[in-house]
């Protein structure tokens, strides 16, 4: 098969694009070492917005937005990450069973729940 210069250039371009797409890293937070659950902070939301874990399990939040956020329990005592810049993470080990509503102190409209089971 004889390729013209234009066809050869197009083949090289498409091959390069395919390599870029296949090597693109996955989005979302990496699972915490040793297991556990993850929550992404993206587009001014906690994803997933409702999470259920067993007592003793770890949960790791990762901020994927370009602005800072917090992970703050509404009760004011259970957990509070402080401000997390882009790429920042916060880990919490679930204790007493119950449902904990949390929010972002910087953007109070951001809310989610963590349910801890026995």
Image (tube, rainbow, N blue to C red):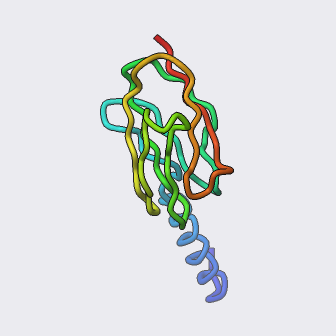
How many discs appear? 0
Extreme residue in the right direction: 109
- Estimate the x, y position of residue 104 in percent, counting from the top left: 56, 50
Question: At 57% from the left edge and 70% from the top edge, which residue is drawn?
Answer: 17
Locate residue 112 relative to residue 63 in the image: left or right: right
Question: At 41% from the left edge and 56% from the top edge, which residue is drawn?
Answer: 88
Extreme residue in the left direction: 34
- In the figure, residue 4 lies in which quadrant? bottom right
Position of the N terminus, as image quadrant, is bottom right
The one of 41 and 97 positioned closer to us in this rendering: 97
The one of 26 and 84 positioned closer to us in this rendering: 84
- Estimate the x, y position of residue 9 in percent, counting from the top left: 60, 83
4 vs 75: above or below: below
The one of 93 and 24 positioned closer to us in this rendering: 93
- Estimate the x, y position of residue 23 in percent, counting from the top left: 47, 59
53 vs 83: above or below: above
Question: At 62% from the left edge and 32% from the top edge, which residue is drawn?
Answer: 50
- In the figure, residue 106 lies in which quadrant? bottom right
- Estimate the x, y position of residue 98 in percent, counting from the top left: 53, 19
78 vs 103: above or below: above
The one of 88 and 22 positioned closer to us in this rendering: 88
Locate residue 71 relative to residue 43 in the image: left or right: left
Question: At 39% from the left edge and 35% from the top edge, which residue is drawn?
Answer: 92
Extreme residue in the bottom direction: 5
Extreme residue in the front direction: 76
């Amino acid at each position: 098969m004889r390729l013209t210069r234009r066809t050869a250039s197009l083949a090289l371009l498409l091959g390069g694009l395919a390599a870029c797409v296949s090597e693109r890293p996955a989005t979302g937070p990496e699972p915490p070492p040793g297991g556990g659950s993850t929550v992404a902070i993206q587009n001014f939301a906690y994803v997933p917005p409702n999470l259920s874990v067993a007592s003793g399990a770890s949960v790791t939040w990762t901020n994927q937005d370009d602005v800072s956020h917090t992970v703050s329990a509404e009760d004011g005592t259970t957990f509070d990450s402080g401000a997390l810049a882009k790429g920042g993470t916060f880990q919490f080990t679930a204790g007493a069973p119950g449902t904990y509503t949390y929010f972002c102190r910087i953007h109070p409209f951001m809310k989610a729940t963590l349910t801890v089971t026995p």
